[in-house]
Image: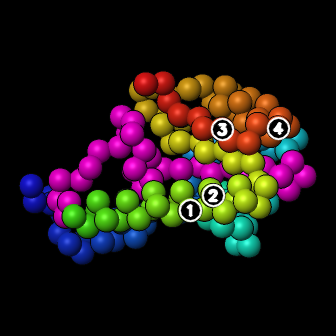
Amino acid sequence: MTDVVSKEVRSRMMSGIKSKNTKPEIMIRRGLHKQGYRYRLHDHQLPGKPDLVFSRHKAIIFVNGCFWHGHDCLLFKWPSSREEFWKTKISRNQDLDSKNIIELQQLNWRIAIIWECALKGKLRLKLEVVIDKCATWIISDVPFMEVFGHM
C-alpha cells in the first residue's frame, strides 16, 4: 500500500512526534504531583533516561507509546509501508528497552512501565486508577510493575 501523503509531508509529520513531555506522560506527572509526589524528569545519567525518577523511593517510571515500543495491544499495528524499516526500528527500541531495564535493575532501581493503552483507546483505564496504581507502587517494595489497558 502506498502512502497517501508525499514523502516531505510524512517526514514533517513524523518529526513532530515528541519523545518526551507527551500527553500521556504529562497526565501521569500531573496526577502524581497532585498527590504530593516529587520527581526528576528525563534523568540523562540513568539508562534509558526514565520519564520520572523518584530518587527517595529508588523508583522510576517509563510512560511508553505503544507504537514506538511495539506493545502487543489494540493501539499497535505494524505499518504496511516500509515494513522492513519499521520492524528494524521497533525491534531495536524493544532491545534497548530490555537492556535499559536490566541495567537499571543492576543499579537497584525499581521500574514501572505505563503503556499508552492504559490511558487512551477503547480499553483504557480511568486516569484515577492508573495514578492510584502508580502511587501505591512508588511507596511499595515491588521491583517491577506494568500498567496497560484491559485486553
66 sits to left or right of 1 = right
Q: Residue at x 63, y 58 (%)?
A: 102
CA gap, disc 4 and disc 3: 11 Å
For marks 4 and 1, the one nearer the N-term is: 1
Q: Position of residue 88 (x, y in %)?
A: 31, 65
**Image position, residue 5 (x, y; %):** 18, 63
Q: Which secondary structure, mark 3?
A: strand
SS at circle 2: helix
Q: Position of residue 108 (x, y in %)?
A: 79, 55
Determine whether, in the image, residue 128 is placed left or right of residue 120: right
Residue located beneath label 4 in the image: 141
**Residue kind at label 1, given as amino acid type:** Lys
Seen in the picture, residue 31 relative to 26 is either above or below; the reply is above
- Name the amino acid, label 2: Ile
Residue 12 image offset from top left, x and y in percent: 33, 71
Q: From the viewer's perspective, is the residue at label 3 or at label 2 nearer?
A: 2
Within-10-Å neighbours for mark 1: few <14, some 14–19, many 20+: few
Which mark is in front, 3 or 1?
A: 1
**Chief secondary structure of the magenta portion:** loop
Q: Amino acid at mark 4?
A: Asp
> Which picture quadrant has residue 10?
bottom left
Report if residue 114 lies within the magenta region. no
Which residue was labeled with disc 3? 145
In primary-sequence order, the first of circles 3 and 2 is 2
User: Against 38, is 82 above or below?
Assistant: below
| Circle number at residue 99 | 1
